[in-house]
Image: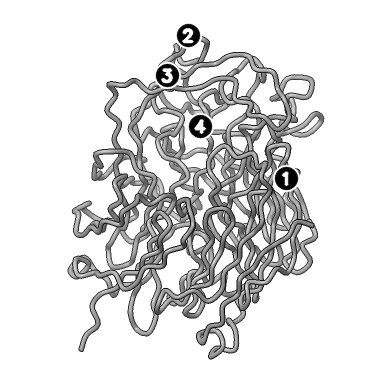
Amino acid sequence: MRAVLMIAICSATLAAQGGPAQVTSQNLLDGLKDPTRWLTYGGEYNGQRHSPLTQITPENVDQLMAQWTFQTGTLGSFQTTPIVVDGVLYVTGFNNNAWAIDARSGRQIWRYRRELPDDLRLCCSAVNRGFAVLGDRLFMATLDAHLIALDMKTGSLLFDVELADYRLGYSATVAPLVVKDKVIVGIAGAEYGIRGFIDAFDVRTGKRAWRFYTVAGPGEPGGRSWPEGDAYKRGGGSIWVTGTYDPQLNTVFYGTGNPGPDYYSNAREGDNLYTASLVALDADTGQLRWHYQFTPHDVHDWDSTQVPVLADLTMNGQPRKVVMFANRNGFFYTIDRVTGKVIVAKPFVTTTWAKEIGTDGRPVLLPGHLPDEDGEKTCPDLGGGTNFMSPSYDPATRLFFVTARETCATFFAYDQKFKAGEQYTGGATSRPRDQKNFGALRAIDPVTASMKWEFRYPTTSAAGVLTTASGLVFAGDGDGNVMAFESRTGRNLWHYQLGFPMRSTAGTTYMLDGRQYLLVPSGSALTAFALPQRP
């Protein structure tokens, strides 16, 4: 067993409480009905990142002031969404560090640090996107492809189970999702030729309950979308953004990553299911209920690992249960979450590879966008129209908010021999030097997939979005500013320079001692904002 180092620091906060309160399955179902808590990656199972809080408003948001800043003292940038339980923040960071922090003062309660091997295979930095919680336990995926459970009060290790062999390129950065008595987690590593999967484990014992492979094998449904032989064994299909859950349908929804190799299409003729797809799985068994593939036979590294946001909408006069999905390939989709059929889909950024999404749900391809040794220019670039940054949906305005990227790149492809544990991309990309990339916060009507307003940033951004019931949208540019906007118009109301750009999240919000806090991870710091206290 690899050694684990945990540094525990005494705290009056937890001592006075007698330890943290139990988080129940009903609490998770209730979501943000208790606004003092933030219990899941998206705030609620639907992934909307929409808070019912109204103390901070468009009229007073310009009075927000920093209350405290927690410095991790570690290298690397936050991509986490903190869990908030009864005045304590539970936060994961770079290299599988984690902390319990007093939400009133920003003081550390305990710290956990995992001892990681020196020979990790990571394509995209040593990040982590957050904890899941149930009972008195926290759950975290690790860079060496394990799932661990920690005691909320002390940070001590309760169980440690291996997902896959990290030496073969497997890793895990996703925030787990707890549903009933199971903790669900996905694997990453597509750039190393892994076969992706989603696992569910018993929350008490750590015993695996089910596994769904995101790359279909021979004899399985979808298996014929891969060539004969063992190409499926290195087919990719990473999971590195948390899914969502519909309790009424008892279905979890996850976006899957790119096929492997990324660019060289001759190595994997066919649609390559279930990569670059949205999969709907039975929460109890992991059985596939339906899938929708956004980019069949993807050759541009357009992972579909964005957040599937759930809502109930009226479309063409009929109530519909939908999944809203802003995809890395540049199209926004509203999909029936019972059947998996596309209702409406349109580009939300400049796209040159496809004319439209056809009536059969497949993209209508434009010629000249198959990567080769000479290179071909396509929009968007490999970073996509959006990426891992979380969107938000405001049910009052009925608008979907997303951080968009306007970029293009030249894609190259070439044959590459697979070697276990080494990167297996079959190509590369480059950006034209004279290209002027930019980012934007965009508001989309999911009924029509049309853009209602935008606020442009001078550079691309990787910040997520948060909305509140008072009519606010919190987002961030690529230059380190957290910003507040009026949700109906896009008018910029406030900004604060954090010193480092946000990645993945625009923060969370919660009530504590009668005050609404905005909590923003940025760089290696965590900053809490609130309105001035009244005398």
Q: Where does label 2 land, which residue?
A: 374
Task: Single out the mark in the foreground, 1 or 3.
Answer: 3
Q: Nearer the viewer, mark 4 or mark 1?
A: 4
Label 4 – label 1 distance at C-alpha: 21 Å
Q: Estimate the spatial distance between the alpha carbons at disc 3 and disc 2, rounded to whole Å.
A: 9 Å
Identify the residue position indicated by label 4 in the image.
Answer: 302
Label 1, on which residue?
212
Give the residue at x 65% y 27%.
272
Kind of residue at badge 2: Asp
Q: Position of residue 203 (x, y in %)?
A: 72, 66
Image position of 321 (left or right of 509) = right
Q: Quadrant of the C terminus?
A: bottom left
The spot of residue 357 in percent (x, y) is 46, 28
Q: Identify the residue position indicated by label 3 in the image.
A: 410
The type of residue carrying mark 3 is Thr
Sequence-wise first label, 1 or 3? 1
Helix, strand or loop under label 4: loop
Instruction: Compare residues 420 and 452 and report the one nearer the observer.
Output: 420
